[in-house]
Amino acid sequence: MLSFFICLAILVIGYCTYGKMVENTFGPDDRETPAVAINDGVDYVVLPQWKLFLIQLLNIAGLGPIFGALAGALWGPVVFLWITFGTIFAGAVHDFFAGMISVRHNDESISEITGYYLGDTMKTIMRVFAVVLLIMVGTVFAVGPAGLLVKLCKDSGLDGVFLNPMFWLAIVLTYYFIATFVSIDKIIGKIYPLFGICLIVMAVGVASGVLTSSEHQIPELWDNFGSMHPAKTPIWAFMFITVACGAISGFHATQSPLMARCMKSERQGRFVFYGAMVCEGVIALIWAAVAMAFFGGAGELALNLKEHGGSAAWAVDTISNGMLGIVGGILALLGVVAAPITSGDTAFRSARLIIADLMKLEQRTIWKRFAICIPLFILGWWITTVDFDVVWRYFAWTNQSLATIVLWTITVYLYRRKANYLLAFVPAVLMTYVCASFLFVSGQFFGMENRIAAYLLGGVLTLLITLIMIHLLRKNAILPHYRNPTSYH
């Protein structure tokens, strides 16, 4: 239990110290933000700081810090280290600069920003990459809740249309369309803060239940150091890929610009972006610790998950009801149904904005929003008929690869301004090696049986990419910016 509290303290201290250093490196000032200068009443809408924080938390979280942490707990307490240090030095840095650089560039989407610093070819790749990723996230985050709602209705004794997944899928996608289309302050700005509070209360509740129980004990890191995964799955790079949202996630880079468009002042950035990521790290740390304590260790957790078809939703429901009773059951429902829905709709919203940036379509006009939303959701509906089992296996690696590209973008941004680019360079190299080595060692890709050779090849690929990026840094250092980053349209 002591190691859990140490990691928790490090996260809080990291926000206060390293977060402040990251903020000073960026240098927020009192210039007029796009939310104030543009204020189109749709996407550029000034929101209070507390709402910005809670919406950002819910947008980037979804089920990530819960389901991902449960999966990460299979490796044992060593996952605490990745969640803690990954959050402070990689994830929060990634999210903060993704949002703040967006503010300086007219609050444009991450694909456009990548183009400014890594070139037009990478911008094109990122446009396609990000839109496909967002549609996939949004669609899967519609299918999942629809299935859970069917189970809930079945358990409640309902029948008929309520047991038809397509009925609930149609409802969820209809809501997504409305939330994607209307002004951000109409739905997202009003109900998401409430769900954000529920996410926090849910984590605090189960943590309190475990910490005050003599029956459940959180295992210590130093007594269980190393991989405890029942399938003998190595820590590197599988744990780093599996635990994404609780440490670093490329999906966050597509979400931060949404709140960047609603900031009244640049000085809100550390609390909104760095702070939300640290809060997500805390939530992930709690769920990883609670999962191990509640089921009696990584091995027992694995056995219970196997008996229930690997259902993380079952584990969340069991833990919540066991720790919090009826209230826990209600919070579990919000956690496994509302959380993915609130990430799914913002995924579609981000996709709309990326396409709008690509086509140079302003979004004040209703028909221009319709022109993007309708084909976007037709494609989303069609994707729900496709078997996701194979495609979704590659999502985690794709997600971390996106985060890696964004970290390299941030590195170039800081280098051009003669700022401390090592803040992004070091995690960029780390994540490059994570993704490169996973490519060779994982059965999803090359699946090399000789892991030493796989890790060496991953190192060679990482070195090659790093040398290319260093060359790009030196080359771009003398190039002018593509535009004045404070000239708003």
Image: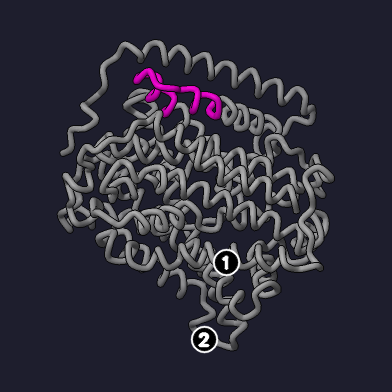
Q: Nearer the viewer, residue 446 or 395?
A: 395
- Residue 160: which numbered mark, if any? 2
Tell me if I can see residue 47 in this picture: yes
Q: Quadrant of the C terminus?
A: top left
- Give how far across and how far down residue 14 sits, in percent: 55, 40
- Give how far across and how far down residue 378 sits, in percent: 35, 58
Question: What residue lies at 51% left-to-right and 63% top-to-bottom?
Answer: 143
Upstream in sequence: badge 2 or badge 1? 2
Which portion, as a residue range, is magenta? 409-428
Position of 9 compared to 412: left or right? right
Q: Quadrant of the N terminus?
A: bottom right
- Give how far across and how far down residue 164 sits, in percent: 51, 77
Question: What residue lies at 28% left-to-right and 61% top-to-bottom?
Answer: 185
Residue type (three-letter) at the residue carrying disc 1? Met
Residue type (three-letter) at the residue carrying disc 2? Gly
- Give how far across and how far down residue 62 sits, in percent: 50, 57
Question: What residue lies at 61% left-to-right and 74% top-to-bottom?
Answer: 328
Question: What residue lies at 18% left-to-right and 37% top-to-bottom?
Answer: 488
- Residue 418 belongs to the span the image colors magenta: yes
From the image, tell me which residue sits under label 1: 202
